[in-house]
């Protein structure tokens, strides 16, 4: 088995007749050879990688390596200060045992230094002998001069080897630093004084806005926004306890996981690893909320089915009216009908969600258009003295959200604000990005604000302060929607009234559904026509069938890009039977229904194919297929 480069390097350094040590920029031992330990009779802990320079100097001073010292602490502090401001040097020093050592030090490009120690006792003895006996020992002088020349040649060769080792060590240190700086995490070391002694300069990538060069700075200054959460954990780590915790960096909205690993021994510090886990936390919150929702009521599947079909017809007819040449008043009425039918479908989803789990259907959303719809729906219910303002800062491109759920949540908040404002006041809905992590929506009003009980319990189901006029489901519904999306809701009182802040994950939508040939199977003609009109408006070509038998004869038509069938058909065979045949023929399949998600047919279909609830938009269909 071949030896590693590190093993070969270590073996080569041990063959050098000189002592060699390399300390990094944090004043910790990086590399040394056997001669370094033997020349100075050092204990094992002083030659381990990571040994602190200050601890080694203190050991040598107390042992008398530098002669009598009156103030050990001052001597150690002086040498540590010299090491931090390291400069190239050469000196010769006589040790307590009489040996003479030459010391040659050079700084490294990335911080730290390399030092080579050479035993020159024999050379110094020869020099003294030459001076004492130069008159009578001319012959011996020549011999000693030859020996000295030979020794010098050996020294030059050893110096060359040491220089090569120093160069390789420098390159190795540079590679290690480059590797750590490429990691998508922040790696650091904190000393017992709670100051950074090492950093891979990636803190700003994990917590935007923090400085890159933090070596020498105290932790409480660098991590001021999250210090209250960090402080007890770093204290526990310095006491020898490993800690892993998560904290939210409020200035950037990032969720950060921090791991503290304590060192062992005198002067031990703590190694810190920080990672951005925002997306993981968002997904975790969404899963937890979905798992925690419980059944609140059971609805009649037939009623939900009929209402869904009626809304599909209303939505289709309103879109057909929108394409006609209508007077301004009639066009506004058609748009209002469309918005109301769309909201009716969303409300139907909410009601059916009480009897089973509900999945959000995110798709590309223009927030300016969405807030305009909220204003249009809420406008007729606002008193004449109440002004509603909507504004979007940034977010010029579409974002990936569930528009039906978000529209309903915002409408709930606006209507709650209306009740708080009374006959006169202002309501504002403002959307903005928080870096590249969140979409933040603020709903504020000039009412009386939240009570202490509402601030504490406002998101609880059935909590209300409106008496018999309130159901207590408005804010809890908003909270449910936000948590299902992996976001957060915060209730507060502003300078003039209440403030509800929603933070939803900021995502870019994938490409939409490309125009294709769609085979639509629906036994109710008016519903089939409404679905056809919506698909054609979006640029798709459509084939229609009223049942399974009719559709079966069309499956071999070239170019079909999607088979879209209702689940319940007034025939012996259902949409599931046709879906199996279409899938066997290699055709993409999606199913539509007005059944609630807890219906057995819905569950059977959703286990195998995309299922969309009627009424739906083409954008929602595209989102389900994605």
Image: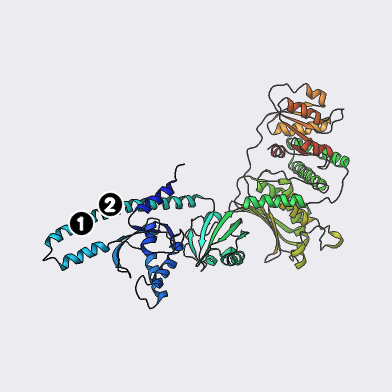
Element assignment for label 2? helix
Which residue carries the number 1 mark? 147
- Residue 548 visible: yes
Question: Where on the picture, by quarter, is residue 474?
Answer: bottom right
Q: Are marks 2 and 1 in contact (CB under 8 Å)?
A: no
Residue 526's disc is none
Dot 2 or dot 1: first in sequence order is 1
Residue 422: x percent and y percent? 78, 62
For the residue pair 152 and 103, the one nearer the viewer reads as 152
For the residue pair 215 and 567, the one nearer the viewer reads as 215
**In the shown orientation, is residue 594 left or right of residue 192?**
right
Residue at 45% x, 59% y is 48
Residue at 71% x, 46% y is 403
Name the quadrant of the C terminus: top right
Element assignment for label 1? helix
Q: How is the image coloured?
A: rainbow
Give the mark toward the camera: 2 or 1: 1
**In the shown orientation, is residue 154 left or right of residue 83?**
left
Residue at 30% x, 61% y is 119
Residue 525: x percent and y percent? 83, 30
Q: How far apart are marks 2 and 1 (CA)?
A: 15 Å
Residue 591: x percent and y percent? 77, 34
Query: Is the residue 410 above or below the residue 239 in the image?
Result: above
How packed is label 2: few (under 14 Cα within 10 Å), some, or many (20 or more)? few
Residue 157's disc is 2
For the residue pair 376 and 598, the one nearer the viewer reads as 598
Residue 517: x percent and y percent? 70, 27
């Amino acid at each position: 088995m071949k030896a590693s480069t590190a093993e070969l390097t270590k073996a080569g350094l041990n063959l050098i007749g000189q002592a060699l040590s390399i300390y990094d920029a944090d004043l910790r031992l990086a590399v040394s050879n056997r001669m370094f330990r033997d020349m100075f009779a050092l204990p094992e802990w002083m030659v381990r990688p990571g040994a602190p320079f200050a601890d080694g100097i203190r050991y040598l001073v107390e042992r008398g390596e530098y002669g009598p010292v009156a103030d050990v602490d001052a001597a150690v502090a002086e040498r540590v200060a010299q090491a931090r401001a390291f400069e190239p040097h050469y000196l010769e020093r006589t040790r307590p045992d009489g040996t003479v050592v030459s010391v040659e030090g050079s700084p490294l490009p990335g911080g730290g230094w390399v030092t080579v120690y050479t035993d020159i006792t024999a050379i110094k003895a020869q020099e003294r002998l030459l001076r004492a006996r130069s008159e009578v020992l001319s012959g011996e002088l020549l011999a000693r001069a030859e020996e000295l020349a030979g020794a010098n040649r050996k020294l030059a060769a050893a110096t060359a080897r040491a220089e090569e080792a120093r160069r390789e060590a420098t390159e190795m240190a540079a590679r290690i630093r480059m590797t750590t700086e490429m990691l998508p995490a922040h790696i650091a070391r904190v000393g017992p004084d709670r100051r950074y002694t090492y950093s891979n300069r990636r803190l700003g990538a994990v917590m935007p806005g923090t400085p890159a060069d933090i070596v020498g700075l105290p932790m409480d200054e660098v991590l001021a926004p999250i210090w209250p959460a960090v402080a007890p954990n770093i204290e526990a780590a310095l006491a020898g306890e490993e800690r892993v915790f998560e904290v939210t960096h409020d200035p950037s909205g990032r969720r950060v996981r921090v791991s503290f690993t304590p060192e062992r021994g005198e002067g031990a510090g703590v190694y810190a690893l920080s990672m951005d886990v925002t997306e993981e936390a968002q997904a975790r919150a969404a899963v937890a909320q979905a798992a925690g929702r419980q059944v609140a009521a059971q609805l009649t599947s037939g009623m939900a089915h009929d209402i869904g079909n009626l809304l599909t017809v209303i939505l289709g007819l309103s879109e057909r009216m929108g394409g006609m040449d209508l007077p301004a008043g009639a066009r506004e009425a058609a748009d209002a009908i469309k918005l109301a039918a769309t909201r009716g479908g969303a409300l139907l989803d909410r009601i059916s969600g009480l009897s089973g789990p509900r999945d959000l259907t995110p798709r590309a959303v223009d927030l300016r258009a969405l807030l305009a719809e909220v204003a249009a729906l809420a406008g007729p219910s606002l008193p004449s003295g109440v002004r509603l303002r909507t504004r979007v800062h940034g977010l010029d491109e579409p974002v990936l959200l569930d528009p039906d759920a978000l529209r309903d949540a915002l409408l709930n908040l606006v209507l709650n604000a209306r009740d708080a404002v009374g006959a006169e006041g202002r309501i504002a809905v403002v959307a903005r990005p928080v870096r590249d992590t969140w979409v933040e929506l603020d709903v504020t009003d000039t009412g009386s604000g939240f009570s202490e009980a509402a601030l504490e319990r406002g998101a609880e189901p059935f909590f209300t302060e409106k008496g018999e006029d309130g159901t207590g489901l408005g804010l809890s519904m908003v909270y449910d929607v936000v948590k299902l999306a992996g976001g957060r809701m915060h209730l507060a009182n502003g300078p003039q009234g209440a403030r509800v802040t929603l933070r939803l994950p900021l995502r870019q939508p994938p490409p939409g559904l490309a125009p294709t040939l769609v085979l639509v199977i629906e036994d109710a003609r008016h519903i089939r026509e409404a679905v056809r009109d919506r698909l054609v408006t979006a640029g798709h070509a459509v084939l229609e069938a009223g049942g399974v038998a009719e559709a079966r004869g069309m499956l071999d038509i070239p170019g079909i890009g999607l088979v879209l069938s209702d689940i319940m058909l007034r025939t012996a065979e259902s949409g599931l039977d046709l879906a199996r045949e279409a899938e066997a023929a290699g055709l993409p399949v999606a199913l539509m229904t007005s059944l609630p998600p807890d219906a057995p047919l819905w569950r059977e279909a959703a286990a195998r194919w995309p299922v969309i609830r009627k009424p739906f938009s083409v954008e929602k269909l595209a989102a389900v297929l994605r």
